[in-house]
Image (cartoon, helix red, strand yellow):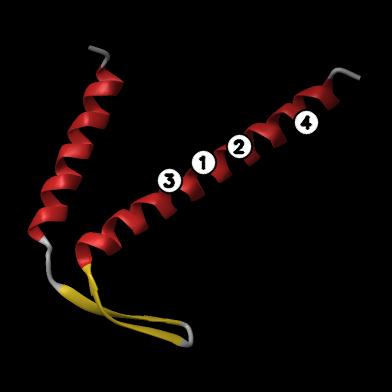
Amino acid sequence: MKIKTMIVLFILLIFIIILFQNLEKVSIHLLFWEFEMVPLFILFPITLLLGIAIGFLLSTTRKKKKSIKDDGEGE
């Protein structure tokens, strides 16, 4: 098994352990909104997915900028 796959599986295992150890309900204040009694086991995956989406968007914009820069240097 590749080392990258093993690291991803290990991080996923840690995430699942953290998820099931945090079953409390919390209130969230976001700008003008307030959400009462949101379970942490719902909040954690949402936060993880937002982080993955932001990372993906940043990586694709960097790749596009780099390819545009590389194309302009050949002229």
- Distance of label 2 from label 1 (alpha carbons): 6 Å
Q: Mark 3 highlights which residue?
A: 52
* 48 with respect to 58 (left or right): left
The residue at 22%/38% (across/down) is 12
What amino acid is labelled 1 in the image? Answer: Phe
Residue at horizontal 71 percent and vertical 36 percent from the top: 65
- Label 2 amino acid? Thr
Q: CA distance from mark 3 to mark 4?
A: 24 Å
User: Disc 2 or 4, which lies upstream in sequence?
Assistant: 2
Q: Nearer the viewer, residue 63 or 1?
A: 1
Which of 70 and 24 lies nearest the eye of the viewer?
24
Query: Which mark identifies residue 56?
Result: 1
Mark 4 is surrounded, within 10 Å at the Cα level, by few (under 14), some (14 to 19) or many (20 or more) other residues, namely few
Relative placement, left or right, of 42 versus 52 is: left
Dot 3 falls on a residue whose secondary structure is helix
Marks 2 and 3, the one that precedes in the sequence: 3
